[in-house]
Image (cartoon, helix red, strand yellow):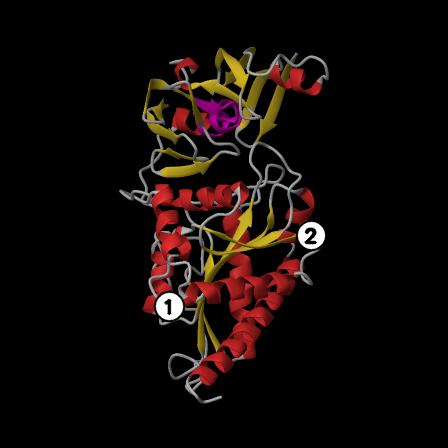
Amino acid sequence: MVVEIENERGRVRRTLGLVGWLLLAGALPAFGQPAADQIEVAGVAFSVEVERHNGYEAIAWSRVPESVVSGSFQRDGSATGQVAGTSLELRSGSPFGRYGDSVFQLSNPPYRLQGEVWVPLELLVEWLPRVQPKSASVAPAAATPEVAQPIPAAATVDERPTPGSRRPGPWRVVIDAGHGGVDPGTMSPRTGVREKDITLSVAKKLAAELERRGGIEPLLTRDRDVFVEVMERPSLAVEWEADLFLSIHVDAQPGGRSSARGFTTYHLGQARTEDALAVARRENAVIELEEGAKPPNLQQLEIILATVDRDAYRRESRLLAGHIQNGLRGAMDTQDRGARQGPYYVLMTPGLLPAVLVELGYITNRADEAQLKDPERQDRIARALADTIENFLEDTGRRIAATEGRG
């Protein structure tokens, strides 16, 4: 059966061998066995052998026809080639791909199996139809991704000393909207809503709420849709002499699954569960988008963290994570997944200040997504976070004052 799908970019014809087979119970081939699939994109017809190893359809990179991806090559887990004269690069374990000077995201990452790189079938049936009509007629123009120079949120600075703060003036809170620019973060498989847009909206609402209340100066690592390098974000907290660092994110469940839901707050430490480690790997993968950057070894990072487990600022971070979980319960109609620890690059603040990363919900879950993209719900989340930050800093002030004999 042949189905034509039409969108603003044109028509895509696909022979439903695999898709029809997925929809008809009892017709599934055995696990890991190849299934023939006929695909036609932008006038090019070809067949592929599809297999399932990680819960989603994939094709071996060496089996992609030369007429679709020319000069295909794989080495050390990377798969490269040319599509319509423009370079394409994918890496095993990362959902991000690079096409020319732009970055795109797949729902599922490529992976290595028996020395072969396997790429999700969606690369051919969903991504290719989007780029082929455009690239067939006009070569993509070279572009340099815009990089932000992070700017503190506009605020009226109160110069009065805050009891227990580290300097004259109000408390300073760095609000980090995760992802941005060429890095979309996670995306909804249903609506295409992007993590970077949700995090920016919540971050700006939180900054505005803190400004309205006074006594706390909010500083945004980004106030628009631009890319900020992952290791630069925590460094800004030190540069700005901040008292607290909060990175806002949205979670996702891999493999096309959608059952997981709920909010989680992470502080820096060794991952105690496989789920926590998987989330850390996904968030840390952003560093691959940085030109010339080499990700730190995650195992080495965990060894380092094990030796500094009693650091004062890490105890403060654990306390802050618990405060945030308690504060969000009344704002989110979803599961409380608790405060956890994990090896996140963005939480490696080279200074003594509490730093946490909050995952507000699962964009892959229909109910969570509805809340995450709702402006009124975002307002509630921002108010709950503002309450939490105020309470935490007031408590911190009392503890610091008592320690210094001023309580």
Magenta stretch: dominant SS? helix
- Which residue is the site of mark 1? 352
The boundaries of the magenta stretch are 118-131
Estimate the x, y position of residue 340 in percent, counting from the top left: 54, 53
Q: Note whether 320 is above or below 88 in the view shown.
A: below
Q: Note whether 132 is above or below 402 in the view shown.
A: above
Q: Is residue 372 left or right of residue 79?
A: right
Near mark 1 (Cα within 10 A), the count class, few <14, some 14-19 or many ≥20, is some
Q: Nearer the viewer, mark 2 or mark 1?
A: 1
Estimate the x, y position of residue 33 in percent, counting from the top left: 56, 12
Q: Which mark is residue 334?
A: 2
Q: Which is nearer the eye, 25 or 81?
A: 25
Q: Secondary structure at mark 2?
A: loop
Residue at the left extreme?
Answer: 292
Q: Note whether 77 is above or below 61 in the view shown.
A: below
Estimate the x, y position of residue 268 in percent, counting from the top left: 44, 56
Estimate the x, y position of residue 221 in percent, counting from the top left: 41, 61
Q: In percent of the image, x 57 and y 18: which residue is there?
A: 13
Q: Are marks 2 and 1 in contact (CB under 8 Å)?
A: no
Q: Amino acid at mark 1?
A: Leu
Quadrant (top left, top right, bottom left, bottom right) of the N terminus: top right
Q: Marks 2/1: CA distance?
A: 33 Å
Q: Which is nearer the eye, 192 or 142?
A: 192
Q: In percent of the image, x 57 and y 32: which residue is there?
A: 255
